[in-house]
Image (cartoon, rainbow, N blue to C red):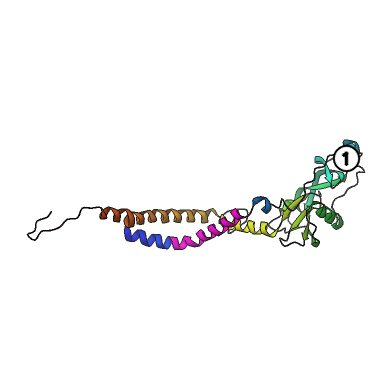
Amino acid sequence: MHKTARTLHKWLMLFLGLQFVIWSVTGTYMVFMHIDYIHGDSLISNPQTKINPDKLQYSLAKLLQTYPEAEQISVGKLMQQDVYRFSIPAINTTINATIKSTQQVLLNAQTGERLSPLNQTAAIALAQYYYLGNEPITKVSLLTDNPPFELSARHLPAWRINFDHFSAPSLYISADSGLLVGKRHAFWRLFDWVFRFHVMDYGDAEEIDNQLLFWIALSSTLATVSGLILVYFRVLRRTKNKRKPMFSKRKHGGVT
């Protein structure tokens, strides 16, 4: 049993050693980095503005008359401007099928003018309004499909605005609602990858490989059991043997 446990423990730990190193390194990074900084709270401002109902000159009745299929209607702000946000049914026709979805609409609450989709100038103004820093903008791009893993596809179309900072911050502004739908910087992107390695998500970013987890857990259990057996033989049993009384043989065969 001692020999079998030693062989099993050696090869299992050789197999699991790399994953243990990954857990240690990734865990250290996640503990070292402050979670508020990782979430990008220091990148943006959070202005608290109140809505004056007297300034909503475009009534809800007019809105429903123009957009009878409007749903989830809300009143909010677009910087300092009062706006309506709501969704309407949209039909996307592809080669194989017709897909029903919803589209976000942004209206000026004073004139009823439709503001969406936002153009590049409006997106830049919003990004500068939300961004706390004063670094210049390095790149502006409109994302309509194939978003990066840091942005959900439900927020498309969206404007991505990059700022000239050592952490490479990016703000994502919805072209339909004008809302800030995402923010990322280099340390947050690294944190995303570190977390995936820590939970052994080596495949799809939205689904952890349960098969891999099963074999790692089984191997870890066997390595632990074999290690406990080695502890017994190398520590406990050796200590027990040392405590046994010493016997000596006399010349004539007697024993004391």
Quick one: which residue is furthest to the left in this view?
A: 252
Q: Quadrant of residue 95?
A: bottom right
Is residue 134 placed above or below 54 in the rendered structure? Answer: below
Question: Foreground residue, 3 or 244?
Answer: 244
Range of residues picked out in magenta: 13-32
Residue wearing tag 1:
63
Residue 159 x/y as whole percent: 79, 56
Tally of numbered tags: 1
Which residue is rendered at x = 86% and y = 56% of the image? 119
| Disc 1 residue type (three-letter) | Leu
Asked whether residue 243 appears in the rendered view, the answer is yes
Which residue is rendered at x = 65% and y = 51% of the image? 35
Residue 157 x/y as whole percent: 78, 54
User: Does the magenta segment cover residue 14?
Assistant: yes
Location of the N terminus (image quadrant): bottom left
Magenta part, dominant SS: helix
Question: Foreground residue, 33 or 93?
Answer: 33
Left or right of 32, for residue 181: right
Question: Foreground residue, 31 or 12?
Answer: 31
